Amino acid sequence: AQTVTQSQPEMSVQEAETVTLSCTYDTSESDYYLFWYKQPPSRQMILVIRQEAYKQQNATENRFSVNFQKAAKSFSLKISDSQLGDAAMYFCAYPSGNTPLVFGKGTRLSVIA
Amino acid sequence: DAGVTQSPTHLIKTRGQQVTLRCSPISGHKSVSWYQQVLGQGPQFIFQYYEKEERGRGNFPDRFSARQFPNYSSELNVNALLLGDSALYLCASSLGLAGAANTDTQYFGPGTRLTVL
């Protein structure tokens, strides 16, 4: 079975500091995409960042960047200059076969003022 | 442009009843997928529809069914509701078929919170 493991159920970060959320996955696909989604208390799942596995360069979107290690099947999310609005559940996910997205269990991020 | 919309926002049903959830995709998107998110877990894939045809199904019982209309909106039906069906139901849309062989990104609606008593 295809799986996504997020080993940190909860994380906290001071405002303006940097935090890294971990994700490992297990896929037999040779080419694939990886995603981080954010789910604030409003429940809406929001796309944070996307990485194409065939690209060696790590994706970046403003304060969000990834550390993609294909051989290790690791896909961590780094949030720089953390803001109060970053507080949310963060989910790592990837498509597998006919399944559009397989999600991890999520990491709850708290931002401390 | 409007994002993915879902209705209703909240729903309370009793065991054994039937429920219909609705989803309208982003304009121009032809694929709609449904996910179930139980409290404290990540979303689980239920169905994907593309061009009005079922193109993928997750590990859910036959009590769950869906369809897609010519305007690409979709309905998810759940029959004979069980307490365990209580969850947030998320709809996501993409331009084309989403999956391992495709590049399209899914965008999510705000969800429907279903409570089964």
Image: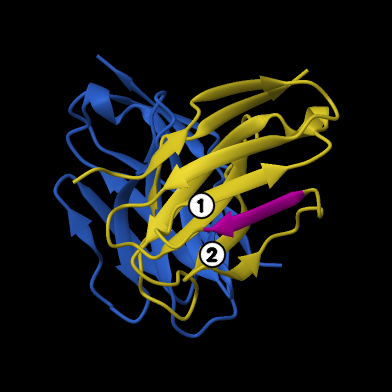
Chain colours: A blue, B yellow
> Residue B53 falls in which quadrant of the image?
bottom right
- Mark 2 and mark 1: Cα distance apart in space: 8 Å
Q: Secondary structure at mark 1?
A: strand
**Which residue is outermost to the top?**
A113
Q: Is residue A90 above or below residue A51?
A: above
**Which residue is outermost to the bottom?**
A30
Q: Position of residue A86 (x, y in %)?
A: 28, 30
Q: Position of residue A74 (x, y in %)?
A: 46, 63
The answer to which of B42 and B16 lies nearer the viewer is: B16
Q: Residue shown at 31%/52% (left/top)? A: B26
Segment colored magenta? B64-68
Residue, disc 1:
B74
Labels 2 and 1 in the same subunit: yes
The chain letter for the residue carrying disc 1 is B
The answer to whether residue A90 is visible is: yes
Q: Secondary structure at mark 2?
A: strand
Neighbor class of circle 2 (other Cα within 10 Å; few <14, some 14-19, many 20+) is: many
Residue, disc 2:
B49
Q: Residue shown at 59%/80% (left/top)? A: A28
Left or right position of B92 against A111: right
**Which residue is outermost to the front?**
B70
